[in-house]
Image: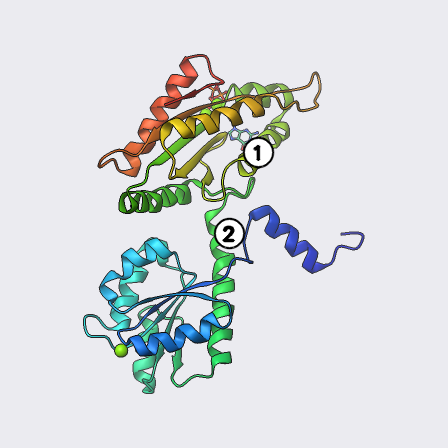
Amino acid sequence: FTGNLDASSLIERIEVLTHVSQYDPYKVLIIDDSRAQATHTERVLNSAGIVTRTLTEPIQAMAELADFQPDLIILDMYMPDCNGPELAKVIRHNDRYVSVPIIFLSAEDDLDKQLDAMSEGGDDFLTKPIKPRHLIATVRNRASRARNLKSRMVRDSLTGLYNHTHTLQLLEDARFRARRDGQPLSFAMLDIDHFKRVNDTYGHPMGDRVIKSLALFLKQRLRKTDHIGRYGGEEFAVVLPDTDAATAAKVLDEIRQRFSEIIYPAQPQDLSCTFSCGIAELRGELDGKELSKQADEALYVAKHGGRNRVEI
Ligand code: GH3
Ligand code: MG
Ligand code: MG
Ligand code: MG
């Protein structure tokens, strides 16, 4: 590569592209039955700008993981209901948390017991008392690498948006929160109109450009709290927390309008594109599958109603 691009500015660029937010503080879930122990750990980590949440009842771990989405877990060895290694095994059993680092923090100094705990899913075993700098460095290093890896696993490489699988996981998390908080939730599905023609007339690279530009357009115009996914080839999905269907339709319709006004310089003639969109709102006991099915049905109506429109 040329010019004054050094490695760090290159990395910065890649992070902008893939939206890895290395600048968001790391989030650590502390699971320890002793409030006093947990408070000490919290203070050390908080002093380094790391956000913490503490759970003294391991039984709530799975719900807390879904809600807090920590970068890393600090786990006690001995707790009344359930010991640390057992809990690590349960956490690891869930697809979503196979790669979240688990660090045991305990006064246990028997190496056999430490190694057993690691074999159940722990990544590190830190023995108390531990120097604050040691704890902070371990947490930072592990969390940083895990965050990088995760962002690569959950994103689509062409657009940097969330991939299909992760979009559905985000929908599940959002559904959980919407239910808990009694807030509305909408799910939108978008599909570019007559996209085959774009590829056939202008070539595949031009098609890719349109896909990337719609991705960027959605990122710019939606809220930071909305989750945008590339659902398939020229299909996108958006999870809109705290938003009812009518509001979602208004937002997406404005995006639809603006997107249709973009002109891509091309041969044999300049190109513009439109998309159709279907929206469904979470109601009653709808699960994620049913919600996306309803959005898909609304999308079908939009397509058959003449395309370039938003339907609920
Ligand atoms: P409709 O308005 O009914 O959606 O028409 P359409 O032509 O968009 O419908 P269809 O889903 O049949 O075609 C989608 C096309 O998108 C087919 C495929 O070649 C193209 N496509 C899928 N993924 C990509 C991609 O990553 N890049 C490009 N350039 N084209 C893609
Ligand atoms: Mg304990
Ligand atoms: Mg399609
Ligand atoms: Mg299409």
Q: Which residue is mark 2?
A: 152
**Left or right of 202 in this view: 5:** right
Residue 121 image-quadrant placement: bottom left
Frontmost residue, 232 versus 279? 279
Residue 60 position within the rendered picture, expressed as x and y whole percent measured from the top left:
25, 61
Which amino acid, mark 1? Phe
Compare residues 195 and 37 and report the one nearer the observer.
37
Query: In percent of the image, x 50 and y 61: which residue is there?
Result: 25
Query: Which of the two residues, 309 or 86, is positioned nearer the viewer here?
Result: 309
Seen from the viewer's position, the closer of residues 132 and 211 is 132
The secondary structure type at the circle numbered 1 is helix
Sequence-first tag of 2 and 1? 2
- Say above or below: 212 vs 154: above
Q: Which residue is mark 1?
A: 217
Image quadrant where one finds the C terminus: top left
Q: Quadrant of ligand 2?
A: bottom left
239 relative to 195 in the view: left or right? left
Q: In this rendering, is residue 40 above or below 31?
A: below
